[in-house]
Image (tube, rainbow, N blue to C red):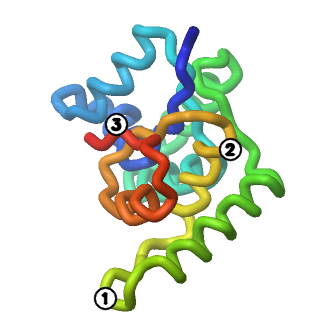
């Protein structure tokens, strides 16, 4: 049985830029070699391309084409954010607001909450190097994140 992994943009960034020496690149390569399902949602896709748009046009278009081909060839599974995911994100956001003290209040962005809600709703694990997810995981009490 393959495990689905929602791979955050900070991890995919190193892979698509071919930074082979990084833990992020090595982890994505391991997932591919083990035939695990790599999932992203449109927010991750957008974040990834937004960061890459700062490099030259030819590289940007090459990486965009790579991602489109990876989806077409079922190497990457694109997850649509539906109403159930938005509802989950609202519940998580409410928990963050009510359960954390003002000192510890979550100051992350809604994108992280939506990424977390996506993974929870599809039963996937998140692979990230973004520490902002720790507060979400703490409040939801779901251990679904692998940090690099």
Q: Name the residue under label 1.
A: 103
Mark 1 and mark 2 residues within 8 Å of each other at the beta carbon: no
Cα–Cα span, label 2 and label 3: 29 Å
Q: Nearer the N terminus, badge 1 or badge 2?
A: 1
Given residues 124 and 35, the one toward you in this image is: 124
Q: Position of residue 72 (x, y in %)?
A: 70, 22
Q: Where is residue 54 in the image (x, y as percent from the top left)?
A: 40, 58
Write the residue at 56% across / 21% down.
Answer: 37
> On the rendered structure, is 72 left or right of 5?
right
Given residues 102 and 119, the one toward you in this image is: 102
Write the residue at 53% across / 37% down.
Answer: 6
Q: How many numbered tags mark residues here?
A: 3
Q: In this view, does 17 lie above or below 129?
A: above
Packing grade of label 3 (10 A; few <14, some 14-19, many >=20) is: few
Write the residue at 32% across / 26% down.
Answer: 27
What quarter of the picture does the N terminus occupy?
A: top right
Q: Name the residue under label 2.
A: 121
Identity of the residue furthest to the right in this view: 83
Number of the label disc, if any, that sits on residue 15: none
Packing grade of label 2 (10 A; few <14, some 14-19, many >=20) is: some
Label 2: which secondary element = helix
Cα–Cα span, label 3 and label 1: 37 Å
Q: Position of residue 8 (x, y in %)?
A: 45, 45
Q: In this view, does 118 lie above or below 105?
A: above
Q: Mark 3 points at which residue?
A: 17
Q: Nearer the N terminus, badge 2 or badge 3?
A: 3
Q: Residue 108 is drawn in which quadrant?
A: bottom left
Q: Where is residue 57 in the image (x, y as percent from the top left)?
A: 48, 48
């Amino acid at each position: 049985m393959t495990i689905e992994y929602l791979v955050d943009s900070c991890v995919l960034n190193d892979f698509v830029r071919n930074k082979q020496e990084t833990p992020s690149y090595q982890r994505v390569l391991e997932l591919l070699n083990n035939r695990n399902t790599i999932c992203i949602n449109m927010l991750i896709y957008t974040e990834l391309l937004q960061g890459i748009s700062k490099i030259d046009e030819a590289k940007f278009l090459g990486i965009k084409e790579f991602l489109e081909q990876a989806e077409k060839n079922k190497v990457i599974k694109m997850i649509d954010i539906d109403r159930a995911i938005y509802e989950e994100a609202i519940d998580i956001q409410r928990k963050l607001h009510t359960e954390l003290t003002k000192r510890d209040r979550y100051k992350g962005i809604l994108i992280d909450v939506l990424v977390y809600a996506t993974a929870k709703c599809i039963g996937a694990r998140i692979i990230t190097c973004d520490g902002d997810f720790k507060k979400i995981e703490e409040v939801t009490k779901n251990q679904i994140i692998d940090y690099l």
